[in-house]
Image: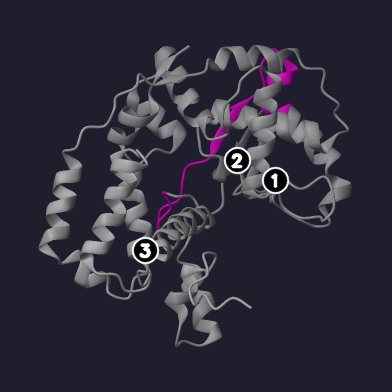
Amino acid sequence: MSTDPFPSRISPFSLLTQGVSSQAAKIIDHAWRPATKVNYQKSWDKWVRFAGDRGINPLSPTPQQFIDFLAHFYATVGLAVGSVLNIKSGVLNFLSNRSDIVNCHQFKLFLQGLSKCPTAHKQAFVWDVNRVIEFLASVRLDLSSPYFLGRHLALLILLFGGRRVHDLTLLSIKPEHMVFVGNSVSLQPTFGSKTDKMGKIQSPFLFQDGPVFQLSIPSLLRHYLTATERVRDGNTCLFVRSQPPKGPASVQLLRSWIKATLRDAGITATAGSTRSASASDALLRGLSIEEIMTRGNWSSESVLKRHYLKEVV
């Protein structure tokens, strides 16, 4: 039986609900988006392994121990400054002595120095959307297959809509969220996007049929609704699992769909790369930065320019 009081897979989020009722714990848990919880859990696992190897109390390290942890990932592992800062933010949330570290003068100086450290510059490239569109336009679709039709449709929405994979999980077939008008459709995501706040929700996706059926999202949506009718079991999320257990398609499943379809098109890339590819392609087609930000639900122009607009190859 293990005697390790801090197993690497401990949920750091449980540390924030200690001492409160189960009802309060559930409410606190809603403060975190699923994608954020996955990201922070990965950062926490890195920290616990680092602390365990060095005999450090992972819940209450000294500022110097935490500084050494961050320095290790920059200098030894070779992570970019932004990645190190992302790990820092994830771990700090769960430390019992967070304020001691944040207010430590040495820690402040370390962050100032880290922000000025060089990062090896690599020319950023992204794959060509047109290559994928040509593939999707030539596919012989099985309109009765929820799986193949669903992943085809999901990739089209990302390429033409320019938003995050997670936003696909917010699409609903309820009448107030999916409105067909002639040969067009409006898809209003439910609340839950990274940029959603009280009183503000992202704008709807707007799509129209075109001359190529395989690229016409409104027509494909109608076929997808028919194909998934037998597997929905009352579920109103747009994308659903085609195999048991029944239920909405998770963001992890959607990523696997997108990655598999890209691979069929001859592109080896992550599902998240569709956002950069779509934005970069839109810029090449003459859209303004403002138009790209509106279409892709961007909240930061600087983030778009620095990290997502890349040279297309």
Label 2 element class: strand
What's the residue at 24%, 69% (across, down)? 62
Q: Nearer the viewer, residue 258 or 222?
A: 258
Q: Is residue 228 left or right of residue 252?
A: right
Instruction: Inspect the magenta stretch and tell me whether residue 148 lies in it.
Output: no
Disc 2 residue type? Leu
What's the residue at 51%, 75% (across, down)? 4
Dot 3 or dot 1, earlier in sequence: 3
Q: Which residues are magenta?
A: 195-219
Please tell me the numbered disc located at residue 54.
3
Q: CA distance from mark 2 to mark 3?
A: 51 Å
Badge 1: few (under 14), some or many (20 or more) residues near its Cα, within 10 Å? many
Disc 3 residue type? Arg
Q: Which residue is mark 2?
A: 187
Q: CA distance from mark 2 to mark 1?
A: 10 Å
Q: Quadrant of residue 304?
A: top left
State which mark lies toward you, 3 or 1: 3
Q: Which residue is mark 1?
A: 238
Task: Point out the image quarter for the N terminus.
Answer: bottom right
Instruction: Inspect the magenta stretch and tell me whether residue 214 lies in it.
Output: yes
State which mark lies toward you, 2 or 1: 1
> In x, y percent, where is residue 184?
64, 29
Badge 3: few (under 14), some or many (20 or more) residues near its Cα, within 10 Å? few
Q: Are marks 2 and 1 in contact (CB under 8 Å)?
A: yes
Q: Quadrant of residue 66?
A: bottom left
Q: Nearer the viewer, residue 164 or 312?
A: 312
Label 3 element class: helix
Q: CA distance from mark 3 to mark 1?
A: 48 Å
Label 1 element class: loop
> In x, y percent, where is residue 22?
55, 84
Disc 1 residue type? Leu
